Image (cartoon, helix red, strand yellow):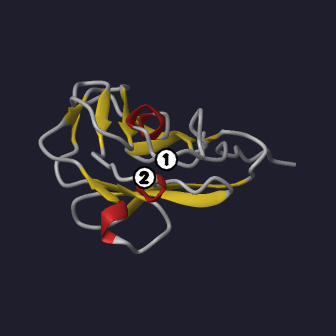
Amino acid sequence: MALVPVAPAQAAALPTIQIVKIYYNSPGSPDFGANSSLNGEWAQIKNTTRKAVNLSGWTLRDKTNRTDHIYRFGAFTLGAGKTVTVRTGKGKDDARNRYWGRAGGTFAYIWNQTSDTGYVHNPSGKLVDSCSYNSSRVEWVNCL
């Protein structure tokens, strides 16, 4: 009986940009949309490659079709293996944090407290990664 070598199963390739975590139930919420509470709600994405990725024109959004629930990256490069946190409220953008710039009370929150889906699209509009959750018992979801 001849033995035939079998190649190991290939693992699914990681997306270039991957949603790592969504913190959807910020400390103190529900409240009246204080900036500190809005910034306690965030999504973190990671560059899974060994090269920097230019995120200009990439988008992060939730399940709604509302245009104000779409965060569009401006001029920003995410280093190899690095993460960036996109916070809902206002603040000064830097290498680790980007700010959606939302304000205006309880309707300023992006992520629903019980269930939602986050999506990352490249500049061409192609879906690169998504992460869903369906629980009000915890504050965040690990998307890895």
Residue 15, position as x, y percentages in the image: 44, 48
* Dot label at residue 105: 2
Left or right: where 127 falls relative to 106: left
Residue 29, position as x, y percentages in the image: 59, 42
Answer above or below: position of 52 versus 56.
Answer: above
Residue 22 or 1: which is nearer the viewer?
Answer: 22
Q: Which amino acid does label 1 sit on?
A: Phe
Residue 43, position as x, y percentages in the image: 46, 41
Residue 134 or 120: which is nearer the viewer?
Answer: 134
Q: Residue furthest right?
A: 1
Secondary structure type for disc 2: loop
Classify 10 Å Cα crowding around label 2: few (below 14), some (14-19), many (20 and above): some
* Dot label at residue 32: 1
Classify 10 Å Cα crowding around label 1: few (below 14), some (14-19), many (20 and above): some
Q: What residue type is labelled 2?
A: Gly
Which residue is at 19% across, 34% downward? 77
Which residue is at 79% across, 44% downward? 137
Where, by quadrant of the figure, is residue 82 drawn? Answer: top left
Secondary structure type for disc 1: loop
Q: Residue furthest bottom?
A: 65
